[in-house]
Image (tube, helix red, strand yellow):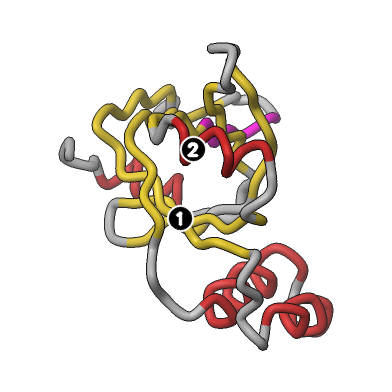
Amino acid sequence: MPSIEPHVDEFLSQTLVGVISTVDAEGRARSAPIWYQWEGGAAYMFTGRRTLKWRNIVRNPSASLCVDWREPPYRSVILDGSVEEARRPLYDLVLSMAIRYYGDEEGRAFAEGYREQPEDIVIFRLVPTRIADYLSEG
């Protein structure tokens, strides 16, 4: 895993939506917006086990996550690496993320649907082997 510069760590710790890119069965790139939580040098995410993104990851665990700021001055960080399933309480992760993305009241209501740890939902993490940062300083 590459070393993570403090300004990259700070950028990835913000509440931004990422875009994950995977490779489908025909070798085509597929991208989808996704919530993420940056923790311990890895991006944690969740999705349904039947989604195209998860089926692609199971077939080929290489993925890329682009996190960007879409207003001037434009900035982004792109993480390339391997995805692995993560074993941790689903509700706790979803609650933390939902509160960050939706706020307290709406976030708690959203997370309730994940309290019973549905088996068709998977938590995964992207551990970067390459980090490209396009962050303007100042």
Residue at the image point whose x is 24% and y is 40% from the top: 5
Residue 120 placement: quadrant: bottom right
- The amino acid on which the numbered mark 1 sits, given as a three-letter code, is Phe
Outermost residue toward the top in this view: 27
Q: Which residue is mark 1?
A: 124
Instruction: Estimate the spatial distance between the alpha carbons at disc 2 and disc 1, rounded to whole Å.
Output: 10 Å
Q: Is residue 115 above or below residue 95?
A: below
The answer to whether residue 54 is left or right of residue 108 is left
Mark 2, residue position: 57
Judge left or right: residue 51 versus residue 25.
Answer: right
Q: Residue 24: image x %, image y %? A: 58, 22
Element under disc 1: strand
Give neighbour class at mark 1: few <14, some 14-19, many 20+ (Cα, 10 Å): many
Q: Split into 4 quadrants, where in the image is the N terminus?
A: top left
As drawn, the label of residue 116 is none
Task: Identify the magenta region.
Answer: 66-70
Question: Can you tell which quarter of the image residue 70 is in?
Answer: top right
Image spot of residue 83 (x, y percent): 38, 43
Quadrant location, the C terminus:
top left
